[in-house]
Image: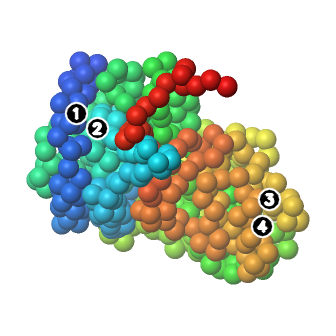
């Protein structure tokens, strides 16, 4: 067993099973034995998945409370948006489960090709500690809709809500063995799962460093990988933007979930002429953010997930001087892993602070002099997950779409997504796709069958 603790006050929550290779093997065998029957009937899958969505909605309070205790994310989000989106994913992919038709390719008079898509069998999924319920749903829903079974390893920092979800799925009528949860650590449980010979494909969300490692391991056995990795996403504000709305977006994007969001656009680039005005809007907007006990429904920002992550945020911000915002509303709890929301306006361009994913409640503001400089700064990162652009010019909006090197471009909005909008990390932000029909495509193999009604003749018999 290992302990999971609460970042709210550092207290012990529960002992959780610490899976090792033998447990992973048992889970993969369980998934493999359920795969043929689960893969056989799409409408049965759709029925169960809709019921799972209902169970999630009905248990919003319980799911939210457990996630908040384990991860520190504010309960207004965990019992609210998180539950809505997680249930929505099961509904969306339930709608797909009984519509996975193939196609035919005509091949002249006497032959036809049938193109079918079939499940891989067992998929391995590895989830990060941020948004544990939503990330579990993001993996599970498309994978099982396509007729696969899976073994999911939640992160060691936040395993609990996934275990509750497993119970709800069972109550919804999900057959045993379709979804198998192994709790434990990356090296002990994640690595044998990635290496397991009966796993057909791997779906991972987490850091770029671990993503690279998993892709290399998958290369040895030639398994496909879907990787949703880190980001250092820009939020670009032109002088013709609605500055107040843009500031509200920057504040939300930076500070939601205490900055622990892969698509956070906390690298804020502002037109030089409106810099002061924009900063004033940000300060005003951030002043009233409530930071404290995430179990209080009024709280917007809770603690950082773990001591390690808190230390990482401290290390990355050590060299820069920032301004603490939300001073009056900053109410950390003793023993909790709190970091004050901070806005940084001056920092060296080549520092770790400027280059690395911070994953904490810290906004970095920098100005630009021309549109050209705005696009070049926005793209000046190894990552390419998302970008948000604020302008009232159609020309600039169009340029944003063409110029930004990232998988999601938000124009005059931020974090607006639905179950149907595909998200694909460019550059080192990932491989493959989450959400949308495109995500499901990755969890099916293509099989082409050519059938001939006439007599087949050997090409050897042909003479020039
Ligand atoms: P991580 O990428 O190491 O952990 C994510 C998951 O991978 C966890 O379930 C972990 O147990 C598992 N894992 C770790 N090593 C593994 C291995 N060798 N084989 C299989 N599975 C393995 O992330 P970590 O160390 O918790 O966070 C470090 C940094 O990564 C954060 O500060 C943040 O910058 C970034 N991160 C980004 C996320 C995103 O959504 N883009 C999510 C989590 C972390
Ligand atoms: Mg925890």
Lower position in the chain sequence, tag 1 or tag 3: 1
Residue 210: image location, x then y, percent: 51, 31
Marks 1,3: beta carbons within 8 A: no
Crowdedness near tag 2: few (<14), some (14–19) or many (≥20) residues, C-alpha within 10 Å: many
Where residue 10 sits, quadrant-wise, is top left
Mark number for residue 446? Answer: none
Calculate the distance from the C-alpha at mark 2 to the C-alpha at mark 1: 6 Å
Q: Which residue is mark 1?
A: 31
Residue 399 disc label: 4
Q: Nearer the viewer, mark 3 or mark 2?
A: 2
Q: Who's the residue at 55% across and 50% down the image?
A: 424
Q: Where in the figure is residue 265, as x and y percent of width and height?
A: 61, 58
Task: Respond yes or no on whether mark 3 lies under 8 Å from ligand 1.
Answer: no
Density class for disc 1 (Cα within 10 Å; few <14, some 14-19, many ≥20) is many
| Distance Cα–Cα, label 1 vs label 4 | 47 Å
Q: Secondary structure at mark 3?
A: helix
Image spot of residue 363 (x, y percent) = 64, 58
In this rendered view, identify the residue nearer to me: 114 or 154: 114
Circles 2 and 1, Cβ within 8 Å, touching? The answer is: yes
Whichever of labels 1 and 4 marks the residue nearer the N terminus, that label is: 1
Q: Can residue 463 be seen?
A: yes
Is 79 positioned to the left or the right of 256 in the image? left
| Residue marked by disc 3 | 375
Q: Position of residue 183 (x, y in %)?
A: 27, 33
In the image, the residue with mark 1 has its CB under 8 Å from the nearest atom of ligand 1: no
Determine the residue positioned at 40% across, 34% down.
455
Going from the N terminus, do you reach mark 3 or mark 2 first?
2
**Residue that mark 2 sits on:** 150
């Amino acid at each position: 067993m290992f302990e999971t603790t609460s970042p709210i006050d550092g207290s012990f929550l529960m002992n959780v099973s610490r899976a090792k290779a033998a447990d992973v093997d048992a889970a993969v065998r369980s998934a493999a034995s359920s795969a043929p029957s689960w893969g056989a009937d799409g409408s049965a899958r759709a029925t169960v998945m809709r019921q799972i969505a209902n169970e999630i909605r009905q248990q919003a309070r319980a799911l939210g409370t457990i996630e908040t205790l384990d991860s520190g994310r504010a309960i207004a989000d965990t019992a609210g948006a998180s539950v809505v989106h997680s249930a929505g994913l099961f509904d969306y992919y339930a709608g797909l489960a009984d519509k996975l038709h193939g196609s035919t390719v005509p091949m002249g008079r006497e032959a036809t090709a049938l193109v079918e898509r079939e499940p891989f069998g067992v998929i391995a999924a590895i989830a990060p500690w941020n948004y544990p319920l939503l990330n579990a749903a993001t993996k599970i829903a498309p994978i099982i809709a396509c007729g696969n079974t899976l073994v999911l390893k939640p992160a060691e920092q936040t395993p609990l809500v996934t275990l509750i979800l497993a119970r709800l799925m069972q109550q919804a009528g999900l057959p045993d063995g379709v979804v198998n949860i192994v709790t434990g650590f990356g090296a002990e449980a994640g690595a044998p799962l990635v290496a397991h010979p009966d796993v057909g494909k791997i779906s991972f969300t987490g850091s770029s460093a671990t993503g690279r490692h998993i892709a290399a391991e998958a290369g040895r056995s030639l398994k496909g990988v879907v990787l949703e990795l880190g980001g250092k996403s820009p939020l670009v504000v032109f002088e013709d933007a609605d500055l107040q709305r843009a500031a509200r977006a920057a504040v939300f994007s930076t500070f939601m979930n205490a900055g622990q969001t892969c698509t956070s656009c906390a690298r804020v680039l502002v037109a030089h002429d409106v810099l002061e005005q924009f900063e004033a809007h940000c300060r005003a907007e951030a002043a009233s953010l409530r930071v404290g006990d995430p179990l209080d429904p009024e709280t917007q920002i809770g603690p950082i997930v773990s001591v390690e992550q808190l230390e990482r945020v401290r290390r990355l911000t050590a060299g820069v001087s920032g301004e603490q915002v939300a001073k009056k509303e900053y109410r950390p709890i003793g023993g909790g892993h709190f970091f004050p929301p901070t806005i940084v306006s001056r920092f060296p361009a080549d520092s770790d602070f400027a280059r690395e994913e911070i994953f904490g409640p810290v906004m970095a503001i920098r100005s630009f002099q021309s549109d050209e400089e705005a696009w070049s700064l926005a793209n000046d990162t190894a990552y390419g997950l998302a970008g948000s652009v604020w302008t009232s010019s159609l020309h600039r909006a169009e340029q944003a779409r063409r110029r930004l090197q990232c998988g999601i471009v938000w124009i005059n909005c931020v974090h607006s997504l639905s179950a149907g909008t595909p998200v694909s990390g460019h550059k080192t932000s990932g491989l493959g796709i989450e959400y949308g029909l495109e995500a499901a495509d990755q969890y099916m193999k293509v099989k082409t069958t050519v059938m001939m009604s006439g007599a087949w003749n050997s090409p050897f018999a042909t003479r020039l």
